[in-house]
Image (spheres, rainbow, N blue to C red):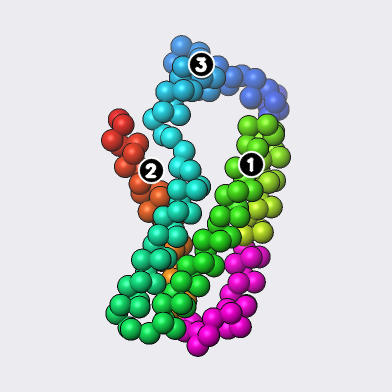
């Protein structure tokens, strides 16, 4: 009464090719034409477009705050809140879009993480400096500008989804 034990490596070898009916593995490398069709179906969104929309939303929110409240302090606070998102975002967009094609995927991932940390550090520094830079700072107004500009990322994702749907 011998019990057969399969080593994990044996199991992987046995299952290779058993993923699909007909013995073909589930992973199949794409041809150049298939990869291009996939890129055309889901085009990447430019980080500069997102930063531009964030700047537009921040400016519009500051103008609207000035019209509604009639106080410059509120408008400047909203604008500064928007700037705490837009300026670090622009720095990151510049950093990650410099030489994307010439570096390895690992170096690209490290570069992305580095620029993300720089973006966070600059944002935090700007928030710390806000009371010194903006006269009669209104923190609620600053937070409104900041949050509105952060929500542009969600709009970009929704817009990308609609672009994919319209091309299908």
Where does the image place residue 138, in percent across and percent down from the top left?
47, 84
Q: Is residue 159 magenta?
A: no
> Residue 8: where, in percent of width, then height?
68, 29
The secondary structure that dominates the magenta segment is helix
- Quadrant of the drawing holding the C terminus: top left
Give the vertical position of 162 relative to 66 (above or below).
Answer: above
Which quarter of the image is occupied by the N terminus?
top right
Quickly name the residue at label 3.
31
SS at badge 2:
helix
Instruction: Based on the picture, tell me whether residue 133 belongs to the magenta stretch.
Output: yes
Residue at (44, 58) in percent of width and height: 54
Please provide percent x and percent y for residue 84: 54, 67
Local packing at callout 1 (Cα closer than 10 Å; few below 14, some 14-19, many 20+) is: few
Q: In terms of sequence position, does the residue under pointer 1 or pointer 2 come before the other?
A: 1
Residue tagged by mark 2? 160
The reply to whether residue 20 is in sight is: no
User: What whole-number distance in Å separates the C-alpha atoms at marks 2 and 3?
Assistant: 24 Å
Residue 38 marker: none
Say if 155 sits above or below 37 in the image: below
Count of labels in the image: 3
């Amino acid at each position: 009464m011998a019990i057969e034990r399969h080593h994990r490596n044996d199991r992987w070898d046995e299952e290779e090719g058993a993923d699909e009916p007909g013995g073909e593995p589930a992973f199949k490398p794409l041809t150049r034409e298939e990869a291009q069709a996939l890129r055309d179906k889901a085009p990447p969104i430019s980080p500069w477009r997102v930063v531009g929309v964030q700047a537009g939303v921040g400016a519009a929110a500051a103008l609207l705050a000035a019209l509604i409240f009639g106080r410059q302090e509120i408008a400047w606070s909203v604008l500064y809140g928007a700037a705490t998102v837009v300026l670090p975002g622009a720095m990151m967009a510049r950093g990650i879009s410099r030489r994307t094609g010439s570096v390895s995927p690992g170096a690209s991932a490290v570069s992305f993480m580095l620029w993300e940390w720089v973006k966070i550090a600059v944002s935090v520094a700007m928030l710390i400096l806000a009371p010194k830079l903006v006269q009669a700072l209104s923190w609620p107004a600053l937070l409104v500008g900041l949050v509105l500009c952060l929500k542009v990322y969600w709009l970009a994702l929704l817009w990308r989804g609609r672009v994919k749907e319209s091309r299908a």
